[in-house]
Image (cartoon, rainbow, N blue to C red):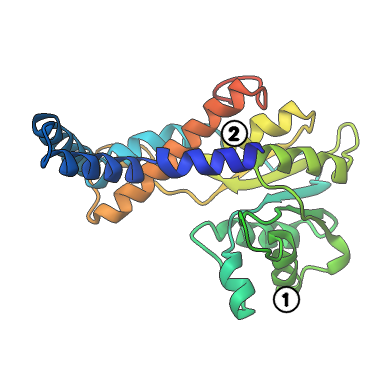
Amino acid sequence: MFFYVSKFLWFFAQPSTAILLLLFAGMVMLWSRWARLGRRLVLVSGVFFFATGLTPLGHLLILPLEERFARADLSSGAAPEGIVILGGAQDMSIHNARGVIAVNEAAERLIEAVLLARRFPDAKILFTGGSSALFEKRMSEAEGAAGLFVSLGVARERLLLETSAKNTFQNAQYSVDMARPRAGSRWLLITSASHMPRAMGSFRKVGFAIEPWPVDYRTRGRRDSWRFFSKPSEGWRRTDNAVREWAGLLAYRLTGRTATLFPGP
């Protein structure tokens, strides 16, 4: 139920959609007795469209998320016993429709997984991700990733496929059950840098001691704090992504899925 409710609420709450709805409401009011309020709504929505589309707001929102966790130090200590990769890097609707591998802008999750698999040939590779489709039946992300990994030289017997998880907390729940990590063993977690705080908080909540390996950075670091966007669509997407993570952190804390509002190292 949490999955479906969160999907529904986010459709209306994401900044790009909310601003469009605000603009539409304002334009409708211009032709009614609430014309004065309509003009204000149109003005406010225009300001927010500019702020989220062109100003550095999206960078400023996502930077604290991306900077929260550094990569685990692999230069010392035991080699990882396993690597957990969170889904979200594939377009399974295209994969199912055309029968081809289809990745999105988070494809570094898959790339880094293969690189680490080659670097640590004895490590287990656990991919967790079911289908995020609300209505149609699709192949799970884990099944799609398995074909990609095998084609890139990762032995099939090394793969552990978790095909049911629909959100980050389920990723953590089902992964710890499947991995059964030994006390003192070392596991790495691969996901987008901006998503790492919520992911680490979820894995800690279920008792899975895991080390971060963030990928898919959307900024160059603090230098982007004052960089404007050259394309409004990029700014809107960045703002939507950042707000989604902050909203997710709040929702997870309120529902007990994480122990703190902003999990850190």
Viewer-side residue, 43 vs 260: 43
Q: Residues within 10 Å of mark 1 (few under 14, many from 20)?
A: few
Question: Which element is circle 1 on?
Answer: helix
Residue 117, image quadrant: bottom right
First reached walking from the N terminus: tag 1 or tag 2: 1
Q: Tally the numbered discs.
A: 2
Q: Position of residue 72 (x, y in %)?
A: 65, 39
Q: Quadrant of the N terminus?
A: top right
Q: Position of residue 124 (x, y in %)?
A: 83, 54
- Residue 101 visible in rendering: no
Residue highlighted by disc 2? 198
Q: Position of residue 217 (x, y in %)?
A: 47, 48
Residue 136, image quadrant: bottom right
Q: Quadrant of the C terminus?
A: top right
Residue highlighted by disc 1? 151
Residue flagged by tag 2: what amino acid is it? Answer: Arg
Q: Residues within 10 Å of mark 2 (few under 14, many from 20)?
A: many
Q: Position of residue 33 (x, y in %)?
A: 11, 32
Q: Circles 1 and 2: CB distance less than 8 Å?
A: no
Question: Which element is circle 2 on?
Answer: helix
Task: Identify which residue is drawn at 74% across, 39% down.
Answer: 172
- Residue 167 visible in rendering: yes
Direction from residue 184 to residue 92 in the image, left or right: left
Residue flagged by tag 1: what amino acid is it? Answer: Ser
Q: Is residue 206 above or below residue 241?
A: above
Viewer-side residue, 121 vs 149: 149
Task: Identify which residue is drawn at 41% across, 37% down.
Answer: 13
Viewer-side residue, 190 vs 160: 160
